Image (tube, rainbow, N blue to C red):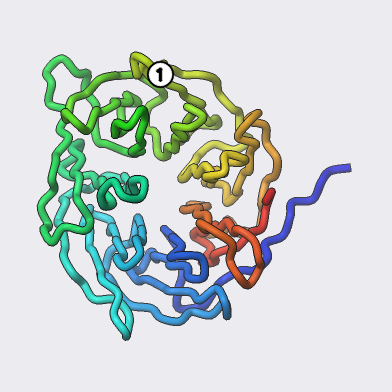
C-alpha cells in the first residue's frame, strides 16, 4: 500500500499576496515572502497572520535574506536593496543596481560568531559576482569575481552559487549557463577549479561538513558533487533520477539529516542526506499556474507554535506551506 504524503501543519495564504518567488525566516517566529508583484509579506508565526506588507518595486522578488536587523531583497533585473528594521516596518537603507537580466539568486554567508560580519554574494553584469559586506555602510562591493581568463571556455551567465568555508578558508562554488562550475578562492579572488556538469544549472547547495553538494536544473535528475579535499578539485559523484524534469531550488537542512528540492511540477521532494534516497513527495502545492515550487527555507530553531523546526515551501500557487518533517 502506497504511503500518503504528509500534510503541512499550516498553510499561509491571502488574496493580495499572489504567487510567491522567495521566502526566508527571521529568527523563528517570523517568515517573509517575496512576491511576483514585487511586494514583501511579513507573517507572524505565532498567530499565522500577515502582520505587514509593503512594496519593494514593480519587479518580482527573486531572493530574500534576513540578518538580525537587516532585510536583503533581490529583484528581477538584479537590483539588491538592504532594509533596516524600524518600529513601523522596514526602511530602505541602500540599493545596488546590479544590472543582471538572467536568473541567479543572491546568497548570504554568515561566518562563525566572532569572525566578521555577513557577506552577500550577488550576480551582476552577465557573469560577474559582487561580494558585499552587509554591515558596512557602503553600496560598493568589497570584491568582484570576474571570470575574464582568456583560457576559460565560454561560460554564459552565472546562474547559481554557494559560498562555504573549508579548512578556515572561504570559497565560492559558482555555476554558469554552459554547465561549467568554477571554484573561487575568496582570499585571493582566483579560480582554483573548473568542472563541466549539465548546462543551465538553476540551483545548488553544498555542505562542507559532509563534503557533498547537490545541483539541479531543467532535466530529470539531481547531481551529487564532492571535493577532493586537499586539491579542492570538484568531482561529479552520482545522479539521482526524479520523475518530472525541472528544479527551481535545493536546500540541505543544517542538521544534515535531509535535503529538499522544489520542482517545476509543484512537488517538494524530501531525500535522506546520508543515503540520498527519496523519503517523501509533498503534493500540497497546486500546479495550475505553472512554475511550481519557487523556494524552500528552514527555521533555525523551533517555531514556538509547533514546538518544532519548520520547513517552509512557496510557489506560484500563492501559498506558503509549513511542514514538520523528520525532526
Q: Which residue appears at 16% of the width and 28% of the height?
A: 188
Question: On the rendered structure, is 107 left or right of 15?
Answer: left
In this view, the residue in front, 3 or 316, is: 3
Report the quarter where the N terminus lies.
top right
Question: On the rendered structure, is 188 left or right of 243?
Answer: left
Q: Percent position (x, y) of residue 252?
A: 52, 42
Which image quadrant for residue 253? top right
Q: Is residue 298 above or below residue 198?
A: below
Q: Which residue appears at 44% of the width and 60% of the height?
A: 23
Q: Check the image and name the residue furthest to the right.
A: 1
Residue 141 visible in the picture: yes
Q: Which residue appears at 35% of the width and 34% of the height?
A: 165
Q: Which residue appears at 28% of the width and 57% of the height?
A: 74
Q: Percent position (x, y) of residue 173?
A: 33, 31
Q: Percent position (x, y) of residue 262?
A: 53, 47
Q: Check the image and name the residue furthest to the bottom.
A: 88
In this view, the residue in front, 109 or 159, is: 109
Q: Is residue 149 above or below residue 123?
A: above
Which image quadrant for residue 154? top left
Instruction: From the image, tell me which residue sits under label 1.
Output: 229
Label 1 environment density (alpha carbons within 10 Å; few <14, some 14–19, many ≥20): few
Secondary structure found at label 1 = loop
Q: Percent position (x, y) of residue 303?
A: 58, 66
Residue 120 visible in the picture: no
Question: On the rendered structure, is 43 left or right of 256?
Answer: left
Amino acid at each position: 500500500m502506497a504511503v500518503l504524503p504528509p500534510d503541512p501543519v499550516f498553510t499561509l495564504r491571502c488574496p493580495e499576496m499572489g504567487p510567491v518567488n522567495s521566502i526566508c525566516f527571521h529568527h523563528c517566529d517570523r517568515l517573509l515572502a517575496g512576491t511576483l508583484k514585487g511586494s514583501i509579506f511579513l507573517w507572524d508565526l505565532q498567530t499565522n497572520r500577515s502582520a505587514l506588507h509593503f512594496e519593494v518595486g514593480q519587479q518580482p522578488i527573486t531572493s530574500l535574506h534576513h540578518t538580525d536587523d537587516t532585510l536583503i531583497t533581490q529583484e528581477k533585473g538584479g537590483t539588491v536593496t538592504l532594509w533596516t528594521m524600524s518600529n513601523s516596518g522596514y526602511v530602505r537603507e541602500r540599493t545596488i543596481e546590479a544590472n543582471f537580466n538572467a536568473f541567479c539568486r543572491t546568497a548570504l554567508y554568515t561566518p562563525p560568531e566572532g569572525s566578521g560580519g555577513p557577506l552577500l554574494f550577488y550576480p551582476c553584469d552577465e557573469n560577474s559576482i559582487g561580494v558585499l559586506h552587509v554591515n558596512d555602510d557602503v553600496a560598493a562591493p568589497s570584491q568582484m569575481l570576474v571570470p575574464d581568463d582568456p583560457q576559460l571556455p565560454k561560460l554564459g551567465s552565472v546562474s547559481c552559487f554557494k559560498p562555504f568555508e573549508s579548512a578556515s578558508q572561504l570559497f565560492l562554488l559558482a555555476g554558469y549557463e554552459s554547465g561549467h562550475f568554477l571554484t573561487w578562492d575568496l582570499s585571493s579572488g582566483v579560480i582554483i577549479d573548473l568542472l563541466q556538469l549539465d548546462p543551465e544549472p538553476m540551483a545548488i547547495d553544498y555542505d562542507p561538513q559532509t563534503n557533498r553538494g547537490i545541483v539541479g536544473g531543467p532535466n530529470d535528475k539531481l547531481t551529487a558533487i564532492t571535493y577532493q579535499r586537499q586539491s579542492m578539485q570538484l568531482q561529479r559523484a552520482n545522479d539521482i533520477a526524479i520523475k518530472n524534469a525541472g528544479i527551481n531550488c535545493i536546500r540541505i537542512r543544517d542538521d544534515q539529516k535531509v535535503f529538499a528540492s522544489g520542482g517545476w511540477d509543484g512537488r517538494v521532494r524530501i531525500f535522506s542526506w546520508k543515503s540520498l534516497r527519496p523519503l517523501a513527495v509533498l503534493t500540497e502545492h497546486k500546479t495550475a499556474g505553472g512554475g511550481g515550487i519557487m523556494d524552500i527555507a528552514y527555521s533555525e530553531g523551533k517555531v514556538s507554535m509547533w514546538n518544532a523546526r519548520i520547513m517552509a515551501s512557496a510557489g506560484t500557487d500563492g501559498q506558503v506551506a509549513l511542514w514538520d518533517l523528520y525532526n
